[in-house]
Image: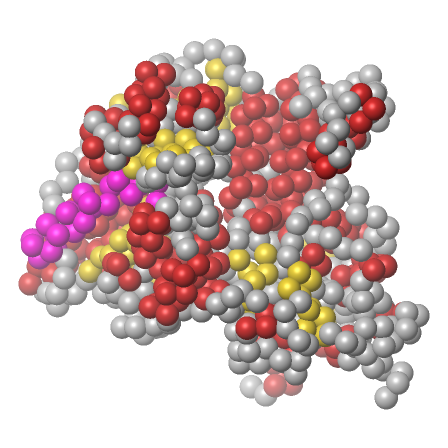
Amino acid sequence: MESHNGPTGQTGAHLLHRLFEVQQQYMHIPKQSILELAGELRLPVSQVESVVDFYSFFHRTPRGRFDLLFSNCTSCGDTAMMRSLCKRLNVTPGETRADGLVSINETSCIGMCDQGPALLVNSRTLTGLTAIRLEQIAAQIEAGVPVPEWPVEWFRVQDNVRKNGLLLGTAFETGSGLRAALEKGPEAMLAEVTQSGLRGRGGAGFSTGMKWKFCREAKGDAHYVVCNADEGEPGTFKDRILLSSHAHAVFEGMSICGHIIGASKGYLYLRGEYRYLLNDLHAVLKRRHKARLLGKHILGQAFDFDIEIIVGAGAYICGEESALIESMEQKRGIPRVRPPFPVTKGYLDQPTVVNNVETLAAAALIAVHGGAWFSGHGSEKSAGSKVLSISGDCTTPGVYEYPFGVSIQRILDDCGAEDVQAVQVGGPSGTLIAPDEFERKLGFEDLATGGSFMIYSKDRDLLKVISNFTHFFAHESCGFCTPCRVGTTLLKNGLDKIASGHGTKSDVDEMYRMATMVKRRSHCGLGQTAPNPLLDALKRFPEVFEQRLVHDSEFEPHFDLDAALEEARQISHRDDAEAHLA
Amino acid sequence: MSDTMKENNNTITIDGREIPFKEGQTIMDAALAADIYIPHLCHRPGLKPHGSCKLCTVEVNGRSASACTLPAAKGQEISNNTEALNGVRKTITQMLFVEGNHFCPACEKTGDCTLQAVAYHLDMLDGHFPQFYPRREVDASHPGIVLDRDRCIMCELCVRTSREMDGKDVFAITGRGIDAKLIVNSASGKLADTDITTDDLAAHICPVGAILIKEHGYEVPIGRRTFDLHTIAEPGVEPVILRKGKHADEH
């Protein structure tokens, strides 16, 4: 199959993959390569260009031969460490050192919140940073030792599973789910999934059985299964464990879905930050081919199904299912207008199921153990269990699985969190709660979550946390709709003003008004949730804002007049007292 | 079932007024057909609905939605011309003004500009928010068309018009978030190296002064321009806007 919009079917031919190769080779995407790729993939030059500019991991100007990206997440990031390495190596953050050796910058959460601080160096994940490690890294860079020759233990990523449950604790024999599903047949298997009460694990919680049914009934030239492994919500890393230690169950869930909806092709969209998992995932696919669990005539039956992996390049918005589909189609990740929904008009405008990694893994277990087994766990409206990524101020961060209905306090006790000031449930797009709410329960009927659980002790400056999240959303907004494109930046600027001690009560009121508007009027889930941290904090922790406000002055201008003269001073080569205000 | 039957059965209510719609119409389509004005910038009848400017935000049975993209459905109760929604629209318009560089008195499009007209309609008297003062490139390479990105509002009317009406692919949006910007589809990145001509609808569709035809400045004096003679809310004003340079009163 060939299409002008979609990839041609070989892993290497996807625009995102080709751009990654070019970026690796030249440390940027030269103009000439854009023209060549446009020709090679038969895409408009402007489309290639727009993709380069959209994804954070592609650059138009050369990055250093060692390109380091420090996570700026409140759990796996440490920008103070970044600044100290910058100082050590004489690098300006965001810029490439004049000799072209090294560049250092920040990036959004890289999903290493249980073993941070962490960074990406030439797209490889490096965890557990310490001052000593930083010094060692600096030495390797100065000596020009290529990253593949750096000690392997620096790149070790642990699973850190602290508590097993229904999904992580039930042994899964490779092929057992698919065998059961093929035996049952698509209708009966769909009935099991529906009966299980399984709801989407990405956070939105749409009924999986219903989604598969709609897609199965939708007419199209082809049907597709997409596994959303673009786990980008800060503080979320549970899919990382499912992909590294339960990949068979995930791929099997995709295959079972494919059998039910009538698809012969599935895609796993892996976030660029998890590129280190790619080789292992390809190896699992290969093993499944050998075992006749993928390919033609699966298990000797009349069912053909194959899976391809597409790797993203640093764009949180691609976790939104329709933006993910656009990205698969080699475009910028702009969320589509809905309706139509992907189940009727998705990838290449064909009926498509997009499911979270955890949802698909659960489906594979449901095939083996039945819908009743699954619905027997959890709460009334939230069947089964939830795999949580717990990070922040606690003694044992890591992956914990609980049946739905568990209380926040119980989780905090299990992970050794004391003197807790606040918990961000479901990541920045979720809910920020205060201690008087710790008896609330996880579940679609109370606190819904995609799996992020970030803990902040009393020692944390909560305004910094909120500011971090607000910056995150402004950085990740796709720019399609006005409320989110402009609003997230206005909120960022407003919060910066307050954090820097220049804010007044009217700035807070103004931000509240803007936050409410962005939440209510944005095009997609990103804009609709971007103001949550700010709104939650204004409601539950108003004092963190009030403490920073200017009270003794009635008027505080939006900008610093003296700072505004800086450019004029530079041009006129003056810095004397007369060239300054007051 | 005949068309009339369908129409009779299919109605929606906008601000208490019941209006008919045909299968496949959006709320905007039905409203325009009934001469009800819902403010909009990125929408243009005949082009694929976009839903990005959010000026046409309405409330459908209490839920926020874009009138230009939401299919009309029987029984929808829609709020449109309310104080609250016009307040939201005014804020959005102010946001569009401050994110770009809009100096109406120095812009050839003044009086013919839809953004300006919408701002007047919504009683917008200032930008309210701090200006972003972005640095954006001007492209004057083309002999007949100038591209002034300072005024671009990312509505993608030119992008869609070129693809859907002109059968070309001259424009695109690149970048992300607040750094999004309009680019052209040529190896040099310059308008002169695209296949656009002054006959293309895409060269005339821009609702602001971002895409202008060269050598045709101020042919209609200020005071007799589109929105000096019409308001944006007037039924049937859409085709008039496109006839820039020659007004409805000068056949």
Q: Quadrant of residue A408?
A: top left
Q: Residue at x 16, y 65 (%)?
A: A304
Q: In this view, does A475 lie above or below A308?
A: above
As for residue A283 lying within the magenta part, the answer is yes
Predominant secondary structure in magenta?
Answer: helix
- Name above or below for residue B240 compared with residue A544: below
Q: In this view, does A184 lie above or below A159?
A: below
Residue positioned 29% across, 37% down in the render? A124
Q: In which quarter of the image is residue A34?
A: bottom left
Quarter residue A264 falls in = bottom left
Q: How far from the left and from the top, in percent, is residue A357?
A: 30, 45
Considering every residue shown, the one lying at the far right of the view is B223
Q: Quadrant of the N terminus of chain A?
A: bottom left
Q: What stretch is highlighted in magenta?
A: A271-293
Residue A201 lies left or right of residue B87; in this view the side is: left
Q: Is residue A265 left or right of residue B95?
A: left
Query: Does B190 lie within the magenta span?
Result: no
**Residue B238 x/y as whole percent:** 75, 75
Residue B47: percent from the left, percent from the top?
A: 60, 74
Visible residue check, residue B12? no
User: What is the x, y in percent for residue A284?
Assistant: 15, 47
Residue at (47% x, 11% y) in the render: A419
Q: Which residue is drawn at 64% across and 64% down?
A: B139
Between B80 and A95, the residue placed more toward the observer is A95
A551, above or below A287, in the image: above
Q: Is residue A531 visible?
A: yes
Q: Quadrant of the C terminus of chain A?
A: top right
Left or right of B227 on screen, residue B48? left
